[in-house]
Amino acid sequence: MSIDETDKKILRLLQENAHFTLKDIANRINLSLTPVHDRVKRLEKEGIIENYVSILNKKKLGINLTVYCQVTLVKQTYNISESFNHSILNLPEVVECNFVSGNFDYMLKIVLPDMESYHDFHQKKLSVLPEVSLINSFFIISEVKGTTVLPI
């Protein structure tokens, strides 16, 4: 599964705007439509292109608070981690969850309308999970950079 410079150009364009048609892409990289189509289909089949999504404006949707939480589990065992993972998958406020190394076990990214919503989430959903021992929360004051574009 190797990608060449032409594949990278296609991927950069699709990251910039997933609405680009195959014709748009072909015109921008000076390639005919059929090879672009074949390349995109191959990139999809190989799983390099996982999905096509729309990126929404959080502020316009009333989601004004982003919180990062460092979560420490009661014990670092497989069963406890798996149980926590399963619980997190059912919390739509959590938009990212990563198992990490260091002084805590998980880093969560949580988005909510406001501080009151976070308080409810913390008290009623996160801190009540039996696997959770400690939560440290960090509130985003201002986002300097937010992108989904990978540097390829």
Image (cartoon, rainbow, N blue to C red):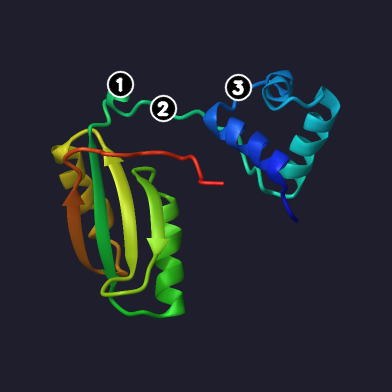
Residue, x 18% and y 61% (percent of image)?
136
State how far apart marks 3 and 1 are (Cα).
21 Å
Tell whether label 1 touches label 2 (CB within 8 Å): yes
On screen, residue 72 above or below 43: below
- Going by the numbered disc 3, the residue's amino acid type is His
- Which circle's residue, 3 or 2, is located before the other in the chain? 3
Q: Name the residue under label 3.
A: 19
- Give 87 or 146, whichever is nearer the viewer: 146
Q: Which of marks 3 and 2 is in front?
A: 3
Where is residue 23 drawn, in percent x and y?
Answer: 74, 19
| CA neighbours of label 2 inside 10 A, class few (<14), some (14 to 19), many (20+) | few
- Going by the numbered disc 1, the residue's amino acid type is Lys
Label 1: which secondary element: helix
- Give 86 or 104, whichever is nearer the viewer: 104
Residue, x 85% and y 27% (percent of image)?
34
**Disc assigned to residue 56:** 2
Whether residue 9 sits left or right of residue 64 in the image: it is right
Where, by quadrant of the figure, is residue 39 drawn? top right
**Disc assigned to residue 60:** 1
